[in-house]
Amino acid sequence: MSREPTIARPIAPTGDLLTVRVTSLDGEGASLAHVEGESAKGQNVRVYGGVPGDLAVVEVLSRGRNATWTKLLRVVEQGPDRTPAPCVHARACGGCPWQAVSRPAQRGAKAERLRRLMDSSHNLRSLPSRPLRWSSRDFGFRTKVQMPVGGRPGALITGLYGPHSKTLVPIGECIVQHPLAESVRRAVLERLNEHRVAPWYVNDASEGDASGELRTLLLRVSEHEAQVALILIVGDPTKRDWRALSQQLMGEIPHLASIGLNVNSAQQNVVLGPNTTHLAGRALLNESILGMDVDVDAASFFQTSAVGATLLAEAVLDASPMAFPHLLEVYSGTGLFTRALRGRYRHATLIERSDGSARTAAARFPDARVIHGDAESALRSLARERLLPGEGAAEGSPDLILLDPPRGGLGSAVDAVAALGPPLVVLVSCSPDAFVKDVDRLATHGYEAVRVEGVDLFPHTPHFEVVTLLQKAHL
């Protein structure tokens, strides 16, 4: 028998109630707290929905070796930074755990965390703190929408998982997602229900057994064009004619410009499968970032919002020199930063693993070299062969390597970067923890961090990115 995800019910808690004082925010979605009347030393209580200064009654969700996880039941005394959460789903949904925290306090907590991380490394602690770069647009900014599907045929739902649980919380309207994406999402869901599309479920009782069709809806908005691309992520594509259905959706839903089908039957927490087939409409959207045209493939990596892409591009521009001969962008996607830096370099090389993004970059930058492949392998190949464009061996190495690795950081690719010996490195870190690890490892190869800036792309969450300029220590 197939198991449906639990809908709109809380996790089974232990039932214990605690009165706690919330003390601080850190890199987790749940705030730090201690039991009221007891010493905070040695305790690690986590409260979903807690705001520093709150005195609150909480319910224990689980007890682990390193923390007791709880959810907020009621606030006895409000902390000074508590503000009404504007979203009706804020308590149940895990997407915006800091919505009840004032925006100045959110930014302050992120800046403090970045400072603590820098102070933890002898390679960073002497650098001054810079103000966090942020946007005043707190809602309707997410132009990438990714929602798992649940429910049943004829009554599909889309939503987000609740905190510390596998509970799928149905979301009628998400106020941080772009209004156009929300409008198209609801219209698509209505049409899919008319066609009685089934959600994809995994059978817990039989390993390897699954049933159904649709796993996830992935939408990408071009604010510049007011158009939306849709990727239907399915576990089993054989149960209907998805191309015919896509053509119908294109004709019925305003602003829907593109539909693709991605097949992912893997029974693990990976959103996209390896291949996406274009079914209807345009292959690419076009976005405007700092007045530049940027091609966006809905199935390939791009920032979760045009606002966020703009903030990062500005930070990269500020960290980079005004003129240099050779740029190497690694983990380039479709080449956002190569596009932003155009006019500062004479030659560019891009390395990108995604086939679709590499093809898009090659079309966008006909004078650049685009290498489709694994970043570390491509870097090692370049170090061996010096295949970058230029005249003579001295000009065969990059003057600036720009790195935007995945959340886990560079890993062993650090050594491959160092093997090319660029005078300057600009590192865009998705994870603040990975930022410190990567800087420390680059330091073993003679690179010194000279500029660090935090960038807040994700209001109402603990997440932020870090842009770092490093140079060879002998410069």
Image (cartoon, rainbow, N blue to C red):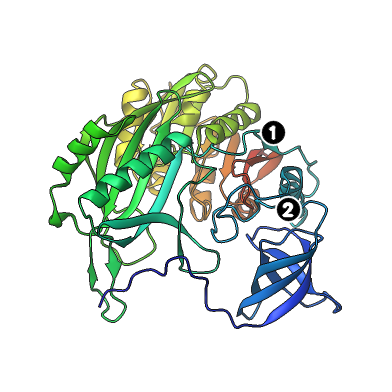
Q: Is residue 178 visible?
A: yes
Q: Which residue is at 55% across, 55% downward?
A: 89
Secondary structure at numbered mark 1: loop
Q: Earlier in the sequence, mark 1 or mark 2?
A: 2
Residue toward you, 411 or 66:
66
Above-or-below relation of 5 to 177: below
Answer whether residue 473 is visible to the viewer in this image.
Answer: no
Image-based side of 85 in relation to 244, left or right: right
Whether residues under marks 1 and 2 lie with C-beta atoms below 8 angstroms apart, the answer is no
Q: At which x and y percent is residue 52?
A: 78, 59
Q: What quarter of the picture does the C terminus occupy?
A: top right
Tally of marks: 2
Give above or below for 111 relative to 306.
below
Vertical side of 366 occupied by 360: above or below: below
The x and y percentages for residue 393 are 45, 28
| Quadrant occupied by the N terminus | bottom left
Residue 67 circle label:
none
| Residue shown at 26% from the left, 61% from the top | 265
Q: Nearer the viewer, mark 1 or mark 2?
A: 2
State the image quarter where residue 307 is shown.
top right
Between residue 175 and residue 389, name the one nearer to us: 175
Mark 1 surroundings within 10 Å by alpha-carbon count, few (fewer than 14), some (14 through 19), many (20 or more): few
Residue 140 occupies quadrant: top right
Task: Return the x and y of residue 33 as percentages of the image width and height.
Answer: 76, 69
Q: Which residue is mark 1?
A: 475
Q: Quadrant of residue 163?
A: bottom right
Q: In the rendering, which numbered label is found on residue 113?
A: 2
> Residue 10: image x %, image y %?
52, 71
Which three-letter amino acid code belongs to the residue tagged 1? Leu
In the depicted structure, whether residue 97 falls above or below residue 278: below
- Left or right: 300 as drawn, with respect to 395: left
Q: Amino acid at mark 2?
A: Arg
